[in-house]
């Protein structure tokens, strides 16, 4: 049900530049969809498999993760429960307990907080364009995205002291229109917002992603700014590597295969962190006027030369996976 996209656009200095993914990334494309649809599909597949899912628990605790038989304790309906494990996948997000189970003396956390957030609006209006448009104007960043042919998602960057309740629908649409290039302003269809929120921008990585028989997966180990749309892709990347490693462990009786998890994941994660930071820096007014001119020069090069277009296209669709030994 996702929308296949073979290109996207970048707007700067009032001009729209097209990034042809099919041409510059060896025929690859991206899919645009609502992430909740992925969750729905996964949970339906989970139910169909007959596996057990336990919801609405509290006081989750991980024990003996460096031993041969780790286990998880939690409370459900007022009673303590226990799950004995071979391995534990900590897929519980940035605020979960899994990362905290790795001692501070063992883990290193790298973080960059950006001075802006994304004010986003979801509306039942047709998209402004067939492709996504990332852009930077004198008034700041904007992104024109979509969830379907009839549902749009728009963003503008705002300072971190802004409050959602101060942004009426009319104020948001007016601000967005002022940031758009003149060539697409008349395409903007406005309407009541279905959802409105402000998401702060953060880059975060935890190393290592493995501690004994515990593996951190997804947001538990890393966060990227949404510029470039790498968050869910990185989580899927972690799952891909962990799945292939577990095939080695259980089908080939090679428990030592787990030792490569952090190395494989982190190499891909840092590439995505770099790309997200780079895209964010080019498309937001984060520095002084000298830095802004440098970023304009980068935008001009990477959207205006064959060499630059190839780099940005390959990074945007995602780098290839490495082999699991």
Image (tube, rainbow, N blue to C red):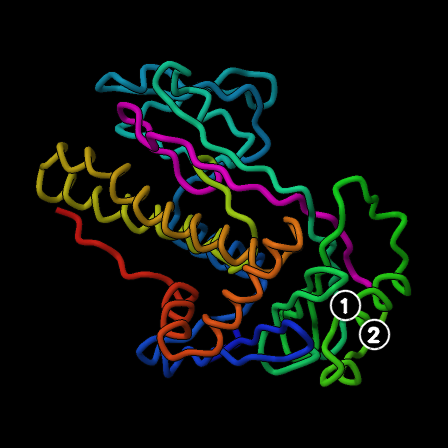
Pick the front one: 323 or 213: 323
Would you say residue 216 sits in the magenta stretch?
Answer: yes
Task: From the viewer's perspective, tell me whether residue 17 is left or right of residue 139.
Answer: left
Which secondary structure type mostly characterizes the magenta part of the structure? strand
Which residue is at 46% across, 35% downward? 220
Residue 167 shows in the view: yes
C-alpha gap between disc 2 and disc 1: 8 Å
Pick the front one: 91 or 320: 320
Residue under label 1, please give it.
Answer: 123
Residue found at the far front of this picture: 290
Q: Label 2's element?
A: loop
Where is residue 148 shown, x and y percent of the image? 63, 74
Contact flag, marks 2 and 1 (Cβ < 8 Å):
yes
Pick the front one: 33 or 323: 323
Task: From the viewer's perspective, tell me whether residue 272 is left or right of residue 33.
Answer: left
**Looking at the image, residue 57 lies above or below residue 39:** above
Which residue is at 30% across, 24% downward? 211
- Mark 2 neighbour class, 10 Å CA radius: few under 14, some 14 to 19, many 20 or more: some
The label number, if any, that marks residue 85 in the structure image: none
**Front label number (2 vs 1):** 2
Would you say residue 193 sits in the magenta stretch?
Answer: yes
Where is residue 74 shown, x and y percent of the image? 50, 20
Pick the front one: 108 or 37: 108
Task: From the viewer's perspective, tell me whether residue 114 is left or right of residue 32.
Answer: right
Mark toward the start of the polypeptide (2 vs 1): 1
Which residue is at 34% across, 47% downward? 239
Residue under label 2, please give it.
Answer: 190
**Looking at the image, residue 92 lies above or below residue 117:** above
Numbered range of the magenta stretch: 192-219
**Looking at the image, residue 149 lies above or below residue 322:** below
Task: From the viewer's perspective, tell me whether residue 227 is left or right of residue 302.
Answer: right
Which residue is at 25% across, 44% downward? 264
């Amino acid at each position: 049900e996702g929308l296949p996209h073979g290109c996207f656009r970048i707007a700067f200095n009032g001009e729209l530049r097209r990034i042809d993914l099919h041409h510059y990334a060896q025929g690859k494309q991206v899919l645009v969809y609502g992430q909740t649809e992925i969750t729905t599909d996964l949970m339906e597949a989970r139910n169909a498999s007959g596996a057990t899912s336990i919801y609405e628990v509290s006081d989750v605790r991980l024990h003996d993760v460096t031993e041969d038989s780790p286990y998880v304790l939690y409370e459900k309906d007022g009673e303590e429960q226990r799950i004995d494990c071979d391995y534990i996948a900590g897929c519980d997000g940035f605020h979960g307990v899994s990362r905290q189970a790795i001692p501070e003396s063992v883990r290193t956390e790298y973080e960059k907080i950006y001075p802006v957030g994304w004010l986003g609006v979801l509306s039942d209006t047709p998209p402004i364009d067939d492709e996504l448009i990332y852009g930077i104007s004198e008034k700041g960043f904007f992104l024109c995205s979509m969830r379907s042919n009839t549902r749009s998602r728009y963003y503008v960057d705002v300072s971190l002291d802004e409050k959602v309740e101060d942004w009426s629908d009319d104020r948001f649409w007016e601000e967005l229109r002022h940031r758009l290039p003149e060539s697409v302003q008349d395409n903007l269809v406005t309407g009541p917002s279905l959802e409105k929120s402000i998401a702060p921008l953060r880059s975060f990585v935890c190393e290592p992603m493995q501690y004994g028989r515990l593996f951190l997966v997804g947001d538990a180990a890393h966060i990227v700014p949404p510029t470039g749309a790498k968050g869910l892709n990185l989580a899927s990347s972690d799952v891909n590597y962990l799945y292939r490693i577990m095939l080695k462990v259980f089908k080939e009786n090679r428990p030592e295969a787990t030792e490569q998890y952090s190395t494989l994941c982190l190499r891909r994660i840092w590439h995505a962190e770099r790309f997200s930071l780079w895209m964010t820096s080019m498309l937001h007014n984060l520095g002084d006027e000298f830095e802004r001119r440098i970023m304009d020069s980068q935008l001009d090069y990477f959207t205006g030369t064959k060499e630059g277009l190839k780099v940005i296209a390959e990074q945007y669709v995602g780098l290839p996976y490495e082999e699991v030994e």
